[in-house]
Image (cartoon, rainbow, N blue to C red):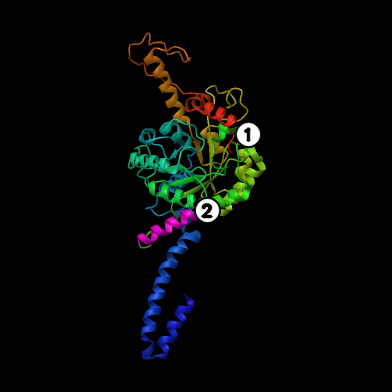
């Protein structure tokens, strides 16, 4: 810019008529570069301290997204939550699985929603979360959910910036290599995702809780490159959107949730290293799956920048919860939203809780409607039924959900035909 201004000054002082056209082109170039520079600066340069009271730069690591961006509502929700002195619990994040479940939670004022890959596999196809759903199916459900909740902010929702709860979408591993990642991020962004999670499992992936110690994870460098690719795909897509809107959109678009599932495969120290690398890359939300103790969650939070947005995801595996917060017979803690906040995390994800309740309620309804009183598979006849249902209030154990969607059959097949 300084060079261009110097050239312009020289042209003016020389007074040569032959320089008039060069002067015109130089001025035009200066204006264009100045306009582009203004937008780029807003993407990459942190705001000055004088503006921090209004843009949240002292408590958020990223700039406020454009109001036209799907991530704007998510940013505003987290900023408002962090700014509130009354916030004693983490932001509740329910794992919805279809448009109806999303609409019900939005109606009751859910501040944000998470579209669960496990839930979509189960509700759309009735199959396990084991890499068998694809991007086309996930895009379809994302569009349906986004359409269903749009404009449904509850009267109890205090976030004035949001017309509907922002939607975080499970992007699995990105569904393949670099080209797949590019399509995944652009497709889900276009469908309405405010944020997309990308994980470090080997494709095809499997539900982390179900896989346990048998989970298969890519090495650290590949995990880092996967997240870097997701961020790059997001930036490229948003750059194209800016060009289509004459650079009216400044700030970043869809957020990237960098997730590691490596705890059971490589240990907790590797979890720390991966999350630090994800943070360094600029992922907007950091998320470590299946940590094994409160101490691990606390150590992870302490190692990350205090402004980094973080999430804890949990599955209520058993309906029997001990006094110490753990499921009966389980060592892994089951944290409340208040405890998640005390550890310094922003979002408390219960990714399959709505699905567990749906499975439990439908199972109880089917038994009552068909006159069944036991859990056996006896189908010899319908007895003692009026067809009138007393509304059940039931929630299924996670083991029952796994059974219903077919994890038992899948594991038997994999044992007999280990075709990796």
- Label annotation for residue 229: 2
Q: Is residue 166 left or right of residue 203?
A: left
Q: Secondary structure at mark 1?
A: helix
Mark 1 and mark 2: span between their CA atoms? Answer: 27 Å
Instruction: Count the labels in the image.
Output: 2
The mark that comes first in sequence, 1 or 2, is: 1
- The residue to which callout 1 is attached is 213
Q: Position of residue 47 (x, y in %)?
A: 49, 60
User: Which quadrant, please, contains the C terminus?
Assistant: top right
When asked about the image quadrant of residue 379, the answer is top left
Who is closer to the viewer here, 75 or 155? 75
Q: Was residue 240 drawn as part of the magenta stretch in this picture?
A: yes
Q: Position of residue 94 (x, y in %)?
A: 45, 35
Q: Was residue 304 drawn as part of the magenta stretch in this picture?
A: no
Q: Is residue 185 left or right of residue 276?
A: left
Q: What secondary structure do most residues of the magenta stretch adopt?
A: helix
When asked about the image quadrant of residue 299, the answer is top right
Who is closer to the viewer here, 205 or 52? 205
Who is closer to the viewer here, 13 or 254? 254
In the image, is residue 238 above or below residue 319?
below
- Label annotation for residue 309: none
Q: Residues within 10 Å of mark 2 (few under 14, many from 20)?
A: some
Q: Position of residue 246 (x, y in %)?
A: 35, 63
Q: Position of residue 353 (x, y in %)?
A: 47, 30
- The magenta segment is 229-245
Residue 395 visible? The answer is: yes
């Amino acid at each position: 810019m300084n060079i261009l201004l110097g050239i312009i000054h020289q042209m003016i002082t020389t007074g040569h008529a032959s320089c008039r056209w060069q002067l015109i082109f130089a001025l035009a170039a200066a204006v264009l570069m100045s306009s582009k520079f203004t937008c780029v600066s807003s993407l990459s340069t942190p705001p000055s301290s004088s503006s921090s009271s209004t843009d949240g730069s002292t408590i958020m690591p990223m700039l406020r997204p454009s109001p036209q961006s799907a991530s704007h509502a998510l940013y505003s929700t987290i900023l408002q939550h962090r700014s509130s002195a009354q916030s004693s619990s983490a932001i509740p994040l329910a794992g919805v699985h279809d448009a109806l479940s999303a609409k019900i939670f939005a109606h009751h004022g859910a501040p944000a929603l998470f579209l669960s890959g496990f839930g979509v596999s189960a509700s759309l196809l009735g199959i396990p979360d084991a890499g068998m759903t694809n991007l086309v199916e996930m895009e379809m459900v994302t569009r349906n959910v986004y359409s269903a909740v749009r404009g449904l902010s509850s009267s109890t929702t205090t976030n004035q910036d949001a017309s509907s709860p922002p939607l975080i979408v499970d992007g699995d591993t990105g569904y393949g290599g670099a080209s797949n990642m590019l399509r995944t991020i652009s497709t889900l962004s276009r469908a309405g995702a405010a944020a997309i999670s990308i994980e470090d499992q080997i494709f095809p992936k499997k539900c982390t809780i179900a896989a346990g110690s048998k989970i298969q994870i890519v090495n650290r460098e590949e995990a880092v490159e996967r997240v870097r690719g997701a961020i790059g795909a997001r930036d490229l897509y948003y750059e194209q959107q800016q060009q289509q809107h004459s650079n009216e959109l400044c700030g970043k678009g869809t957020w990237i949730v960098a997730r590691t599932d490596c705890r059971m495969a490589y240990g907790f120290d590797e979890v720390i290293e991966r999350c630090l690398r994800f943070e360094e890359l600029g992922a907007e939300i950091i998320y470590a799956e299946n940590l094994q103790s409160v101490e691990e969650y606390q150590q992870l939070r302490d190692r990350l920048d205090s402004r980094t947005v973080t999430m804890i995801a949990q599955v209520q595996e058993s309906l029997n919860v001990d006094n110490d917060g753990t499921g009966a017979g389980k060592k892994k803690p089951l944290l409340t939203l208040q405890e998640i906040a005390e550890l310094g995390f922003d979002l408390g994800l219960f990714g399959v809780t709505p699905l567990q309740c749906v499975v439990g309620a439908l199972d109880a309804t089917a038994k009552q409607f068909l006159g069944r009183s036991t859990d056996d598979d006896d189908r010899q006849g319908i007895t003692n039924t009026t067809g009138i249902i007393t509304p059940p209030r039931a929630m299924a154990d996670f083991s029952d959900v796994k059974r219903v969607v077919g994890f038992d059959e899948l594991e038997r097949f994999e044992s007999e035909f280990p075709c990796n």
